[in-house]
Image (cartoon, rainbow, N blue to C red):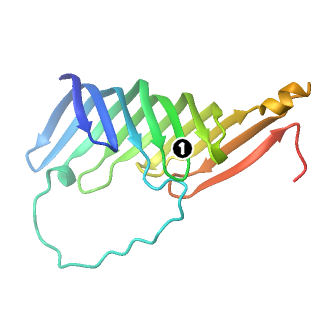
Amino acid sequence: RASRFRLANTSDYNLTIDMNSRLSGSPTQPVASGNLTIKNGFIYLQDFGAESIETVELEEEERSSFSPYDSLGIDMQFTIERGFYVRNSRYLDMEVELTGELEAQKQSDRELQLFGTLEGVQGYARPLGKNFQLDEAAFTFSGPLAEPDLNIKTSYVPQSSQKQGDPITLFYIIEGTPEEPEFRFESDPPMEQ
């Protein structure tokens, strides 16, 4: 059991959690199960919106060593309460507060998998220096931790269009994944390109 435990505290991520879990299995293949609630915190995206750079890894000789995380199995429910933010400040200034539930699964010697959807509660994006307010957001996890499907829609009503009587609403939409996001603008009423 843990209550208001600071799981991480760096400039890139910060998590305070409550946890009710059980560890079973053997010392070389433990399995964690139970519930973990993220009470508050944030994660900064790394290079979100920047051009991706290919990662190159050199092969090494395999070494036989014991890794507690690699050998760990996980079957847990994650609940994310209000007060948890996904942020980005380079390339696109944005912040989205998320809430929801995820199922976390990991087999021994495999990567962590997440399943479920987190919904946006409030937030903003600032493309081109304009403050677009969050209308809706969904981060849908269907496996790999770093590859949720993004669906973020923000809106902005220019003051000049409000004064003219028929306001134009501009939408800034982000879809895709954090590794390969797609950005686009739309408007209501539709504007000519």
Within-10-Å neighbours for mark 1: few <14, some 14–19, many 20+: some
Residue 85 is situated, as x and y percent measured from the top left of the image, at: 44, 33
User: Which residue is pictured at 10% across the width and 59% down the height?
Assistant: 66
User: In the image, residue 183 lies at what x, y percent?
Assistant: 66, 52
Q: Quadrant of the N terminus?
A: top left
Q: Residue furthest left?
A: 27
Residue under label 1: 93
Res 77 → quadrant: top left
In the rendered image, residue 59, in percent from the top left (x then y), is placed at 26, 79
Residue at the (33%, 41%) spot, across then down: 13
Total marks shown come to 1
Q: What residue lies at 14% left-to-right and 56% top-to-bottom?
A: 67
Q: Which of the two residues, 192 or 159, is positioned nearer the viewer here?
A: 159
Q: Is residue 153 above or below residue 145?
A: above
Q: Position of residue 3 (x, y in %)?
A: 21, 20
Q: Nearer the viewer, residue 128 or 31?
A: 128
Could you tell me which secondary element the residue under label 1 belongs to? strand
Does residue 82 lie above or below 106 as drawn?
above
Q: Using the image, determine if residue 89 lies above or below residue 60.
A: above
Say whether residue 60 is left or right of residue 15: left
**Which image quadrant: the C terminus?**
bottom right
Q: Amino acid at mark 1?
A: Asp
Residue under the image location 20 percent in, 47 percent down = 72
Query: Foreground: 182 or 138?
Result: 182
